[in-house]
Image (cartoon, helix red, strand yellow):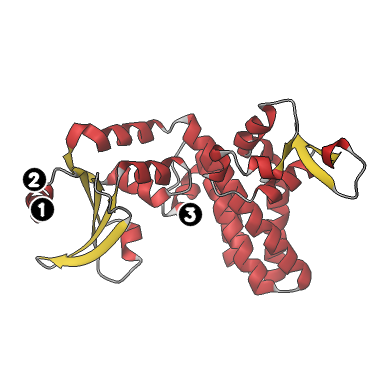
Amino acid sequence: METIRNYVQDRFGTNPDTISVSVVSDSPPLHAAGEHPEVLLLVITESEQTGITTHYIKDGIRIQERCHNPGTLERLIWHGGNYNMIHWILQGEIVMDRNMYLEGMRSRLSEYPEELRRKELIVEFDRFLKSFVQSKQYLQDGHMLDAYSNILDALRHWARIAIIEEGYHPEVLVWAQVRRINPGVYKLYEELTCNHESLQKRIQLVVLACDFSVMSKMELCCSVLLDVLRSREEAWSLQELMQIQELTDLELDLSLLLGKLVRKSLIREVVESENGRPSLLLRLKYTV
């Protein structure tokens, strides 16, 4: 690591655009690209050239360098679901840090603010819901392998929801983490992947568990969306909701979420004629 520290100081120390550099080594996400361990350099810069990833070798060490400006980094973190980036900030060794930028970011993340938890809950619930609905459809149509793939994905998102509920950041190795935090969810993972029952029965078991347990968490997980709907007395159209920056930044499937919230009677669907006049075109709006 001393070699990397010296390299960082030599390369970035006199660059006025460089704000912070963090070094992450021996981290699980870095092994995905190949068999050899890599060192990640997370570079925060004021340069316009941001969002760039480069790979190279320095003194026999394989290096992955990721450059972001503060605005991009903030979006990646505070819009929910980017657990690799959060892991790198929390676990990396900060080698350079002008104005304590990364230290401040690490401190905020360590506190796990309520705003971030709420965003991560709705992002994970949205992802869970898409995989869950798709799995049920494949199961109904008899496509067992596709149903299995999707319900496994849904279960992974359920695991992250359970971890977030307990006040922890989801880690990259989610099953090892949820085994410690929520053994019940991990047991379902074992039942799905290791049970000797038929594939169809294993999928059906997890589908029923998801239907009962996760869908009951809909109000908690969708609090960000519900708060927007409560923010005015007038009902919202889908188009209006899609223009709310707080929601569009999260890249949610609002149509799917709204439909499920209506079916669970957590919100109401309002049918309106265009311009208040009788018309063949009736608009759907949503309110609490």
Density class for disc 1 (Cα within 10 Å; few <14, some 14-19, many ≥20) is few
**Would you identify the image quadrant in which residue 38 lies?**
bottom left
Q: Which mark is residue 14?
A: 2
Report the amino acid beneath label 3. Answer: Trp
Report the amino acid beneath label 2. Answer: Thr
Report the amino acid beneath label 1. Answer: Arg
Which residue sits at x=45%, y=46%?
170
Percent position of residue 246, x then y: 54, 38
Dot 2 and dot 3 residues touching (CB under 8 Å) = no
Which residue sits at x=9%, y=54%?
7
Q: Which residue is mark 1?
A: 11
Q: Which residue is mark 3?
A: 175
Please state which of residues 254 and 177 is positioned toward the viewer in this rendering. 254
First of labels 2, 3 by sequence position: 2
| Label 3 SS | helix
Direction right: furthest residue: 278
Q: Nearer the viewer, mark 2 or mark 3?
A: 2
